[in-house]
């Protein structure tokens, strides 16, 4: 996993709450960690303190590979809020090798080169406030 800087997209700071703090702290270090249920081994997305599969509260954190495949995507030509001035950008669900699907941006390539099934890897765009946004870039040439 590598740090990234994609000036064509804003990097707004997320709201950090106690349940998500380990996730956001790891992103600032260029690492992807995910909650994992100790009872049933479900890898959880979005970080929360209860397993959506079995209801266990025995949740730990596991280092993720930061790799996966594009499950689905769309090209947005006009954003809102912080993304209002962004040019065309890709919004996608990436299915991580660990299982969960994460909504994210695909960066580092032309929107027209993105395809379902494309292997991707995590990059981290610093928010300037102690966290980084996890985005993905093609892992294939």
Image (cartoon, helix red, strand yellow):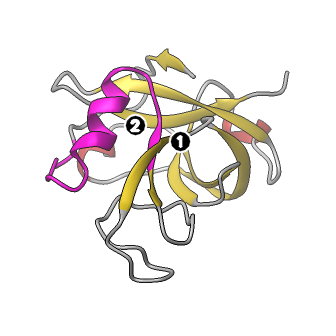
In magenta, the rendered stretch is 14-34
Q: Count neighbours of disc 1 (C-alpha within 10 A) and say few if under 14, some if 14 to 19, many if 20 or more.
A: many
Residue 64 as seen in the image, left or right of residue 69: left
Q: Which residue in the structure is indicated by mark 2?
A: 86
Q: Nearer the viewer, residue 55 or 6?
A: 55
At numbered mark 1, what does the secondary structure look like: helix, strand or loop? strand
The mark tally for this picture is 2
At numbered mark 2, what does the secondary structure look like: helix, strand or loop? loop
Q: Count neighbours of disc 2 (C-alpha within 10 A) and say few if under 14, some if 14 to 19, many if 20 or more.
A: some
Q: Quadrant of the N terminus?
A: top right
Q: Are marks 2 and 1 in contact (CB under 8 Å)?
A: yes
Residue located at (51% from left, 80% from top): 53
Query: Does the magenta-highlighted stretch encompass residue 26?
Result: yes
Query: Does the magenta-highlighted stretch encompass residue 138?
Result: no
Q: Which residue in the structure is indicated by mark 1?
A: 89
Q: Nearer the viewer, residue 90 or 86?
A: 90
Q: Which mark is residue 30?
A: none
């Amino acid at each position: 996993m590598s740090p990234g800087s994609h000036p064509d997209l804003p990097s707004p700071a997320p709201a950090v709450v106690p349940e998500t703090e380990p996730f956001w702290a790891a992103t600032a270090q260029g690492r992807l960690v995910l909650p994992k249920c100790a009872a049933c081994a479900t890898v959880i997305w979005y970080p929360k303190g209860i397993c959506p599969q079995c209801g266990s509260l025995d949740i730990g954190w596991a280092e993720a590979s930061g790799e996966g495949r594009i499950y689905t995507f769309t090209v947005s030509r006009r954003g809102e809020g912080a993304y209002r001035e962004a040019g065309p950008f890709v919004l996608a669900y990436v299915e991580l090798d660990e299982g969960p699907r994460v909504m994210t941006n695909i960066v580092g390539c032309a929107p027209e080169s993105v395809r379902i099934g494309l292997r991707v890897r995590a990059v981290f765009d610093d928010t300037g406030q102690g966290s980084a946004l996890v985005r993905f870039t093609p892992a294939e040439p």
